[in-house]
Amino acid sequence: MPGSNYRIVSLSKQAAVDAWPVIAPILERATDCSRGRFSVADCKVRVEAGDFAVLAAVDANKQIVGALTAMIFTYPQMRVLEVVFLAGVDWAGWGQQMIETVDFVAQAAACRKIEFKGRRGWGPVLAHAGYKEYCVSYEKEVPCSTHASSGMMAEISTVH
């Protein structure tokens, strides 16, 4: 983007691992909102395994100020790029570039859709880029006393 003090870079697996001491505290703000599903350490494992791609917002001083993790799901009818985590400072300075980069990555990977799960606060921000809310998620904790027995799991796994 002309005149911008930021650029978005796609980090190789090794570059992401090398930069993890900087990326981790940035992404921690997002993983903390995952309601126990992911920790920053879990994200690093996924990056090291090649499951997560990492994009970074880099300022004029070559400092990482934002980070995004994404993965591609291949469904029977299409490929979908899912933005798993996104966080950083000065979104106004680099957010539009990040959205455009995600669009480019999805096109290059032959994805038909981009999926972004996040807090409702992202709605107005992403609406400007053409994103639409398509569902709402509900969850509840499963009490330990109601976990299925292994016999029940065997029955469930054989249901056709």
Image (cartoon, rainbow, N blue to C red):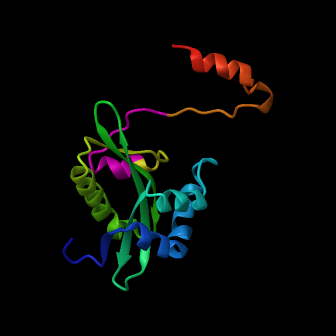
User: What's the residue at 43%, 75% (across, down)?
Assistant: 64
Q: What stretch is highlighted in magenta?
A: 123-136
The quarter holding residue 15 reads bottom left
Q: Which residue lies furthest to the left in this view?
A: 2
Could you tell me residue 150's position as x and y percent?
Answer: 73, 25
The residue lying furthest to the right in this view is 145
State the image coordinates of residue 19 (x, y, percent, origin top left).
Answer: 47, 75
Left or right of residue 111, residue 46 in this image: right
Dominant secondary-structure state across the stretch colored magenta = loop
Residue 85 versus residue 2 in the image, above or below = above
**In which quadrant of the rendered view does residue 32 lie?**
bottom right
Position of residue 129 measured from the top left corner of the image (x, y, whole percent): 27, 51
Residue 94 to residue 141: above or below? below
Image point 46% across, 67% down: which residue?
88
Q: Is residue 34 visible?
A: yes
Left-right relation of 3 to 119: left
Q: In this view, does 4 lie to the left or right of 44?
A: left
Quarter of the image with the N terminus is bottom left
Q: Does the magenta stretch include residue 124?
A: yes
